[in-house]
Image (tube, rainbow, N blue to C red):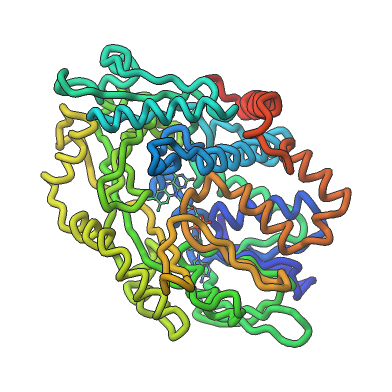
């Protein structure tokens, strides 16, 4: 997509979105759908849409529904399983599917096969204690309507029929267990983002400007935000103005949030974690795997580094990846600068950063271990999931960069968080999204919250409420408490998104 100029007829935009990733794209499409008269300008530093975390190979493309991710179902001290987080994540992904389904029905999005596919979501564990955990997790999840249909097995033959690569060459004496949810999905968030931006950029009053970096913010007494933007091709800077600003700059959000000067930004820091995958090059191997299979994360590792052997569908091709291998880089963006981490440190966040660092020595040790991994170590990790893997079939690829949120905490001084954090000014004139997990899958839930927080009067009007429900039929209702509604919205999403499982 070539850069487009900002609409000169309306020098003060209603909305500016910073970054052309899944978050800004979702917000732009949602807002235009609520009020077609809004003017929206987007600024993206790269010359391409969705080229950072949202691009297909920079993330795992898992439609996070807590079907297979074991970190969303922790074991309590009494041995029971807490499914509250799993219910929340599953519910949020259903909102995303409903929204995308509506966009397909309205002709906003093209053929759903270009961005979403059915793929079973499985968890696989070995060892008696892990088998017992998975059995309890399965039993607990079946109490929720969101997890009906999940299968559980400890039978090696049945599991081998589901995931032959994972069972071949495994010690038959070792106890194993797996769960399988047929209605899992693989999402090409890059393709989805590009389709949404292409659609939005074609609407009157919307312009997405590529190759422009947002550098600074000022707000005067008139309440209008002034953003200093730099054209990276010509090195010229200018000021653009807007009533509302969303900082959807992914890893680049924290430094921008700090520059806004809003008191709500005080005390936030960021800790970058990079990632790598092994990408399979052998079509015969790729053809033999048909699932996203998540395992248990290693002791001390951050929750998002659960190993998984993962079928993907990218640009019409079936692919297979294993990973992620975590790493440490001081960059906040894959295409960022090694000075990003140091530049983000300021008086207001140095204390939370130091305390969070001191409290997470296990994570530091884990990351150092990951960075020092040799190719043989990586093959050994792969063979825990695919025992007969041939290392020459696999190639190492760099994934996207995540910036984990560090927050001020009264008791602990500072805490490291692994979720996302929406920071909004008290008057709702600016909002910023920090963190990366569960990420793109929850973009719709995050943006529905943002709109209600930052545009409260308009969001409460009958017109916007009706539009919310048209786009997301279960809007305002809890799926986890309503089996009939869960079945109905799932059926609608499956039909409109043409998912067959
Ligand atoms: C290894 C990995 C695996 C993941 N796996 C999954 C998964 O399986 N499922 C899932 O749902 N999520 C996953 N995620 C998370 C998901 O990728 C992110 O949550 C999501 O893509 C974030 O979207 P975004 O729009 O906030 O950021 P991005 O897609 O990173 O977009 C931000 C944009 O802002 C631009 N930008 C930055 N600074 C500036 C500036 N100053 N001026 C102008 N533009 C700027 C950047 O160039 C970029 O294009 C994963 C992430 C990683 C890194």
Q: Position of residue 352 (x, y in %)?
A: 41, 75
Q: Position of residue 187 (x, y in %)?
A: 49, 38
Query: Residue at horizontal 12%, vertical 51%?
Result: 374
Report the side of 72 relative to 493 (left or right): left
* Image quarter (top left, top right, bottom left or bottom right) of the N terminus: bottom right
The image quadrant of residue 459 is: bottom right
Q: Do we see residue 26 in this rendering?
A: yes
The residue furthest top is: 157
Q: Position of residue 257 (x, y in %)?
A: 54, 74
Against 406, residue 501 (above or below) is above
Front residue of this view, candidates 470 and 393: 470
Against 71, residue 181 (above or below) is above
The residue furthest front is: 78
The number of numbered discs placed on residues in the rendered structure image is 0
Query: Residue at horizontal 68%, vertical 38%?
Result: 478
Query: Residue at horizontal 27%, vertical 19%?
Result: 164
Query: Residue at horizontal 60%, vertical 38%?
Result: 91
Report the side of 130 relative to 480 (left or right): left
Report the side of 31 relative to 283 (left or right): right
Q: Do we see residue 197 in this rendering?
A: no
The image quadrant of residue 18 is: bottom right
Front residue of this view, candidates 248 and 429: 429
Q: Position of residue 190 (x, y in %)?
A: 50, 47
């Amino acid at each position: 997509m070539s850069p487009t100029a900002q609409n000169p007829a309306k020098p003060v935009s209603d909305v500016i979105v910073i970054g052309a990733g899944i978050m800004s794209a979702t917000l732009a499409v949602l807002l235009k759908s609520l009020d077609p008269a809004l003017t929206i300008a987007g600024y993206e530093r790269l010359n391409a849409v969705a080229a950072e975390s949202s691009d297909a190979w920079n993330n795992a493309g898992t439609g996070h529904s807590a079907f297979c991710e074991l970190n969303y179902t922790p074991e309590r001290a009494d041995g029971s399983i807490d499914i509250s987080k799993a219910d929340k994540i599953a519910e949020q992904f259903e909102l995303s599917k409903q929204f995308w389904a509506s966009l397909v029905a309205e002709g906003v999005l093209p053929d759903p096969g270009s961005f979403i596919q059915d793929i079973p979501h499985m968890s696989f564990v070995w060892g008696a204690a892990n088998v017992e955990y998975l059995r309890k997790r399965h039993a607990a999840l079946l109490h929720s309507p969101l997890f009906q249909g999940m299968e559980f097995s400890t039978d090696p033959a049945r599991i081998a029929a589901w995931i032959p690569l994972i069972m071949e060459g495994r010690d038959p004496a070792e106890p194993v267990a797996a769960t399988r949810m047929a209605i899992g999905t693989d999402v090409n968030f890059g393709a989805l983002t590009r389709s949404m931006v292409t659609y939005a950029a074609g609407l009157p009053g919307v312009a997405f400007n590529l190759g422009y970096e947002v550098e600074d913010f000022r707000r005067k007494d008139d309440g209008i935000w002034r953003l200093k933007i730099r054209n990276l091709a010509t090195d010229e800077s200018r000021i653009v103005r807007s009533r509302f600003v969303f900082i959807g700059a992914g890893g680049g959000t924290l430094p921008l949030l700090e520059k806004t000067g809003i008191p709500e930004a005080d005390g936030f820091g960021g800790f970058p974690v990079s990632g790598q995958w092994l990408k399979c090059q052998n079509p015969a191997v790729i053809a033999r795997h048909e699932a996203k299979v998540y395992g248990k994360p290693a002791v001390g590792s951050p929750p998002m580094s659960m190993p998984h052997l993962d079928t993907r569908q990218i640009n019409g091709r079936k692919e297979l990846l294993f990973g992620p291998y975590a790493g440490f880089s001081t960059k906040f963006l894959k295409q960022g600068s090694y000075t990003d981490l140091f530049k983000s440190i300021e008086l207001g966040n140095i204390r939370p950063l130091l305390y969070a660092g001191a409290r997470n020595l296990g994570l530091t040790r884990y990351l150092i271990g990951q960075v020092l991994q040799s190719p043989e170590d990586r093959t050994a990790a792969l063979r825990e999931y695919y025992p007969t893997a041939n290392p020459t079939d696999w190639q190492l690829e760099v994934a996207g960069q995540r910036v984990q949120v560090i927050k001020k905490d009264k008791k602990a001084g500072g805490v490291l968080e692994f979720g996302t954090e929406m920071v909004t000014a008290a008057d709702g004139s600016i909002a910023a999204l920090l963190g990366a997990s569960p990420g793109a899958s929850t973009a719709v839930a995050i943006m529905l919250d943002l709109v209600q927080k930052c545009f409260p009067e308009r969001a409460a009007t009958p017109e916007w409420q009706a539009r919310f429900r048209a786009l997301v039929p279960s809007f305002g209702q809890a799926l986890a408490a309503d089996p009939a509604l869960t079945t109905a919205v799932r059926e609608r999403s499956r039909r409109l998104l043409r998912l067959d499982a």
